[in-house]
Every structure is written in C-alpha cells, then in structure tokens.
Amino acid sequence: MKYLYFIYKNLTRKKVRTTLTVLSIMIAFLLFGLLRSLSAAFDGGANVAGEDRLVSINKVTLIQPLPFSYLNKVKTLDGVEKVTMSNWFGGYYQDRKNQFPQFPVDAAEFFDIYRDTLNLPPEQLAAWKANRVGTVIGKALAEKFHWKIGDRIPLIGLFPKKDGSTNWEFVVEGIFTGKTESAQTNVMYFHYDYFDKSRQFGEGTIGWMIVKVKNPKESAKVAAAIDELFENSAAETKTDSEKEFSKSFAKQFGDIGLITTLILSAVFFTMLLVAGNAMAQSFRERIPEFAILKTLGFSDVTVMFMVLAEAMLICALGGLLGLGLAKLILVVNASRIATNLPGLDMSFAIIVTGIVWMILLGLVTGFIPALQGLRLNIINALRRN
Amino acid sequence: MTFNWLSQIFIVSWMNIRNISQRLGTSSVAVFGVACVVGVFIGVLSMATGFQRTMTSAGAEDTVIVLRSGATSEMNSGMSYEQTQLVSAMPGIRKEKEAPLASAELFVVVAINKKTNNAAANVSLRGVQAGAFKVRDKFKIIEGRNFEFGKNELIVGRGAQKQFNSLSLGSSIRFGQSEWQVVGVFEDGGGLSESELWCDAKILQAVYRRGNSYQTIRAKIDGPHGFDQLKAAVAADPTLTLDVRLETEYLAEQSVALSTFIKVIGYPLAIIMAIGAIFGAINTMYTSVSTRTREIATLRALGFGAFPVAFSTLLESLVLAFVGGILGATVVYFLFNGYTVSTLNFVSFSQVVFDFAVTPALLKQGVIFAAVIGFIGGLFPAIRAARLPVATALRDTN
C-alpha cells in the first residue's frame, strides 16, 4: 500500500504520456467489448436454444415443406414429449424494408415448449387463442413499430391467400418478453390454422417440426429415430438439436467469429506495441531514479514489483474504461439494435475474459522493464547520463 | 543566418527524417499501428465493395425481371405457366426469329456443405428455359458442356464451384430423392448467377412438386421504350398482379441490406481504431520531440525559426503514417484481393459467393486515412516542439 502513492506520483509526472497510453489501451478494450459482444450475439440463438428441443427440417432444404401427417408419426416415437410445427411467412409491414421474422405456430403447444425462454401473460395467451386472426409479438418488435394490444397489423406476405391477394391482417392480442437476455423478441407468432386454411398453395404441409424430448440426454437418439422413420420417403428429414440448428444457421453468414478474432488480434497486437513501447520508454527515462531507490535500500524485488504494478495499473485503468464505454454504448443502443440483432449485450464471460487480457497485457508490457529494474546495477545506472 | 525560411524548413526536415533511424523502435511502432488500422479499414470495405460488385455487375440495362407484386426477391415470387406465356408474348419484349427473348425460371435453394466449415449452406438452384442463355449476354460455359433439357443435369457457377462441396465436373449430387450430374461450369460476368446452380426448369418443377408454376421471368426489352410498353401492358391486364422491374434496379435493391450492414460495422470500427492509432502516433511524436529536446534547442539557438522545427515534426509524423498506410494497403492487397468468401443474403435466403475487391479507390482512401492519422498525430507534438523554451531545453539531460 505504501508504494501506491509513489506509483501514483510516477504515473502523473508525464500526464500526457500516461493519458495517451491509458487511452490507447482503452480503445483496444472498447473494441474488444464491442466485437466480442457482436460475435456472441450472432451465435446468440445457439446459446438460448435448449438441448431438449429438436428441429426437424426437410433434408433438401429448409424451404421444402413436410407433410402434416409427420407430426402424428413423430408423436408416437419413444422419448418424444411434444411435437409442434412452424413455417415461413416472410412478410413485411408497409415497406419492403420493414422485414422481420413471422411464424405461424400452434398457440398452446408453442408457448409451452418455449416456456423456459418466452413469457406471455396467461390472460393474453387466452385472448390470442380465442381470436383466429390474433397474433402475439415480441417486446422488441412492439417497441420498434409502437404496436400495442388491439392494434390491427396488415402485412404483405410471401404466401398468396385463396383470393389471390397477399395482404394478411392480424390483431395484436399479446406482447411476450424474453426470460433471458438473448431470447429473441423481434418475432411475431400467429395461428397455424389460420395461415394454413387461408393460403392458396401448400395447404396441409408444414415448414418444420419442433420436437421436445423427455430426456435431454436422449436428444441424439431421438433425432436419429425421426430421420430413420422418414428415410427413403418422398420427404426425408434432417433433425438436429435446436442449438446445432441455430449454430449451423449462423455459420451460413460466414465465420463471424473468425473475422472478429482476426480484427481483434490485429488491434490487440498494435495496441500492445503502442502501450508497451510508451511504458518501456517511460521506464528507460527513469533508470537513474531506480538506481537511487536501490541505493536508498529498496530491494531488487521491490523495484521490480513497483514497475510491474505501474504497468498493471495503466492496463487495468485503460481496460476497465474501455469495457465500461463498450457496455455504455451497447446499453444506449440496445433497443435500436434489438430488432436486427437481439441479445447484443456484454455478458459476464466477456468481462471476465477482458480482465484476464488486461492482466496479461500488464504482465507482458511490464515484464521487460521490470526485469531491467531487477537486474539494475546501481553503479552503472547512476553513471548513465 | 542567411537561410531563407523555405531552406530552413528543408534543412530541419531533412535532418529529422534522416534521423528517424535513430528512433527506430518508437517509429516502427507508429508505422505498424497505422499499417494495422489502414489494413483493417481497407479489408472491411473491400468486402463491402466485392459484395456489391458481385450483386450488381451482371445486371444489364436492357433486361427486366418480372415478379409477383410485392415479392421481395425471386424466392418469394410465383406465377403460373399461363401467366408466363401471357407476359412473354406482350409488346416491349425483344423477339428473335418470332420467338420472344424471355426465360421463365424457378428459383429454389438446396442444402450443400460449404468447403470452409463443412456446414450446410443454402445454395440457389435455378431452373431455366432455353431463353435464359440469350437473356444473359455474358453467360459462357467455361468447362464441360451445357445441360441437356429433360435430363437431371446441372451446370454450376464458377463461384459456387469454388465454395461448395461435391460440385466438381462429372460428380453426382443428391438433393433428397433426386440425383444430379454436374456437367458444366459457367461464368456470367462475375455476377450473382455464378453463385448458383442451373438446371432444366421442367425437371426442377417435377422434383420440387411445383406443378407447372414458375417464379420469375427474365426478358430482354425491345428498344428504349420497351420497358414502359411492357410495364403498361402488364398493368393493363387485370388477371396479372405482377411487377416489372429493371434487372439492375432489382439487383441493387437486393444488395443494399448486406452492404449497408458491412459498412455500418466497418466504418465505426475503422474510426475507433483510427483514434487508437492517433493516440499511438501522438505518443510516438511526443517521444520523438522529447528525445530531440536538445537538438531542437540547439537548432533554435542557431537561429532556426519555430515554424521549421514544428513543420519538421509534423512532416516526420506524416512520413511515418504514410509509410504505415502504404504498408497496410500493400499487405491487404496481396492477402485479400480476390479472396473468395460466401455469405447468406437474407433477402433471397441464399448464399452469395463473392471476392474481396481491393480497388485502387479503396487503396487511395486507405492512404488518405493514414495521412489524416499522421497529421492529427503530429500536430500537437509539433506545437510543443515549436514552443520549447530554448534556455531550459539546452540544459535538458535526457
């Protein structure tokens, strides 16, 4: 503790340099916080997705339908607790730019299967079930378009209705929230029955099945059993855990994780050099002082620790400022981004990783000067000028 | 002193630049910092440019695409065979030997694994009619042969072949219950079609149980008024709820979302990194000034003006940043130019294969960016250099 004041004095003697060094480290960690959160949000779906849910799609692709009869066949399989279905809707509101995900689902089954992530008040669920053209929307969506319960929402859909028009109208009966940070609430759900009976083509088919298994440990077995059931039929299935499904979907965008890691490594390496160089410079200038300290009776190790502590302090200060700023930016913009990229938030894991990086950065940048401090020969150092 | 002002600037700056080698450590850090920033800047933007180029380059001014009204992409468009016949016969569509230059097409996606991560990706599979090859001027088979109508044969785009598994010439590939032979590779002016697989529309209808329906019509328009003529004809028919759009406009709209996304992420990223690099540069230049304190004081004592001294510091910073910028730009050019990647275009729900395009314009932007970093980074240290109190600075012991 008693050295703290000394370290503080050292830091403040060249205020500009210290400030600049702290700021460059801050920038590095600001980017770290933002990019890591971004990359996590892309894989976000995968994190919320439960292992006890399976998604079964047509083997050819997601857009090929499955027969309705598959639901009952899957229901009888061992280990299956519940089966429900969904489909694409691909509509937009007023302008082609206003696209967001919409899915026809089975009202009762769906919110039961997703009770661990989505929360819809029971009275709203009841009201929705009672209204054939009713819909429930996520909180992020409600905020984006300022929709409230009772609003009529006309959508232009990708499926033409029996009368040939593609105008679908819905009435908001409920607004659901996510139980976890990364649960998707930029989504709209409506009745499968209404959708299926009203569309011109494809009646009696489903887009994909969502299967809830009794025991998460048996997921893989159940998935294999489903695919086996429909093997060599006209519509073969491909069944994966929801987590795997989300992951492989995220992979379609290309490797976001790899790109952010590449950029971050470039940034980190640069900032490490910049900050490390500035610190090393500052220590070099103070070598005579360290010699005086040693002359006064400070041990080699104490001098070494003082140097190391100073490096750590600068890194921690810059790092925490950077992470704090990243958090602030994310919080301020959260609602705006939520509809496009739900779950954009800095998780605890990211903060911890950040702190580990700060410590590492401090150790690496402080190491060489600290070693110099340790090995410093008093006579030589005092003579230097 | 007999020097004039200009020669003072020249002498001090030249001396300073020659001495950079003595401050190699700090200077190379600044250079490296700028290089990294410029590298990331150009890298991200070259991705956006490459994507846009692929999306728009194949579009021809005299080609139209007919979609169902309100459809956001070919994927969610649809029309019957009768409608396609009706539209093809309409005025405004160019004819060759009495036959209209038009192709009714079917557009679906199939899951094929990507080579890079072996994960399933949505690859576009387009069923075309014979007119398709005449509508697209730049279409060319570059390997193998074209598919034969009535057979389960595929030709694959150049980009698609590079990115996805099992599309080599002569190989066979299964989509569900159907098996296909890859018989040719084609190019189409570097455009979006090169990310696709093509086959006979009739076969695709059967395999995908689409009855006799199609999704889009592509056609050549006849003369400068062809587009308006066709549009009016389609609008006049009450049985048709179709949109006629220029292919170029349609493709530009398809690419907006993703290239905006890349830029929205890319520009702030570059700016934040640039701020970091500016801090680094300022630090380097302050260090440079402080190690040269005595030298600067001596120069001033000899009669050199404050401005030439400040200018030399600014110039040093600019030179370092410039070198960094060139370095970053060069490395990115050799590393990324032409590098092929693919991503999911959400609008059409299918993969777009594109190359990073490190264009001369981007390289120029990158170097200008570096110069800005160098200028801001050198400005304050230059002012300090100019203001050094000569008497105390001469006494400086560092």
Image (cartoon, rainbow, N blue to C red):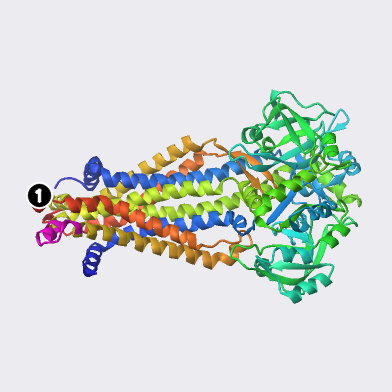
Quadrant housing the N terminus of chain A: bottom left
Q: Would you say residue A291 sits in the magenta stretch?
A: yes
- Residue A159: where, in percent of width, then height? 82, 54
Which of the chains bears the disc numbered 1? A
User: Viewer-proximal residue, A73 or A30?
Assistant: A73
User: Viewer-proximal residue, A227 or B233?
Assistant: A227
Q: Main secondary structure of the magenta part?
A: helix
Mark 1 sits on what residue?
A380
How crowded pointer 1 is (Cα within 10 Å; few <14, some 14-19, many 20+) is rated as few
- Residue A221: where, in percent of width, then height? 69, 49
Q: Is residue B347 left or right of residue A288?
A: right
Q: Would you say residue B69 sits in the magenta stretch?
A: no
Q: Which residues are magenta?
A: A289-301
Q: Is residue A323 visible?
A: yes
In this view, which residue lies farthest toward the top? B144
Q: Is residue B83 left or right of residue B224?
A: right
User: Viewer-proximal residue, B372 or A376?
Assistant: A376
